[in-house]
Amino acid sequence: MAKQLPYHCPIDAAMHVIEGKWKVLVLWELRDRPRRFGELRRALPGISEKVLAQQLRELETDGIVHREVYDAVPPKVEYTLTEEGRELNAALEPLGAWGRRRMAPPGGAGAAAAA
């Protein structure tokens, strides 16, 4: 669950959960459906297996991601968002919209849609 650290403000508490380069991208990839480790690895070019495993463990510890281990051969593990993870993704949606506007060429369709 959430750690009780001496946060300076609510944004500081939220940023503690999503700090780092990859956590928000992992959350984005889990938005629609469960994913296996290999699927996440392929969807996030540039992330190492070690870093992905670490980020997933931290998100699981913080109650954002659920890890389901199935009794199968070969072993099967799926990752899904918890309710808190879905709430966090919903909170990040306006940030994604802002990013889409920043990615659009100046005066392009994205700028017109944002107005």
Image (cartoon, rainbow, N blue to C red):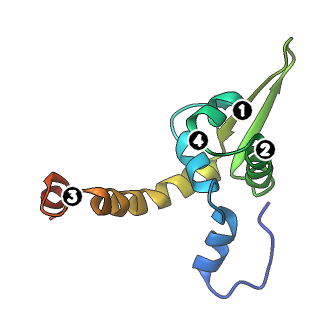
Q: Amino acid at mark 3?
A: Pro
- Disc 1 marks which residue? 37
Q: How far apart are labels 2 and 4 at the CA level?
A: 13 Å
Which of 59/44 is in front? 44
- Disc 3 marks which residue? 105
Q: Secondary structure at mark 3?
A: loop
For the residues bearing labels 2 and 1, Cβ distance under 8 angstroms: yes
Which of the marked residues, 2 or 1, is nearer the chain's N terminus? 1
**Which residue of the protein is positioned furthest toward the bottom in this rendering?**
8
Nearest-to-viewer mark from 2 and 3: 3
Q: Amino acid at mark 1?
A: Phe
Q: Of the numbered discs in the image, which one, if any, rests on residue 53?
A: 2
- Disc 4 marks which residue? 44
Q: Secondary structure at mark 4?
A: loop
Nearest-to-viewer mark from 1 and 3: 3
In the picture, measured across the screen, residue 105 lies left or right of residue 13, that is left
In the picture, measured across the screen, residue 40 lies left or right of residue 5, that is left
Does residue 79 lie above or below 97 as drawn? above
Which of the marked residues, 4 or 3, is nearer the chain's N terminus? 4
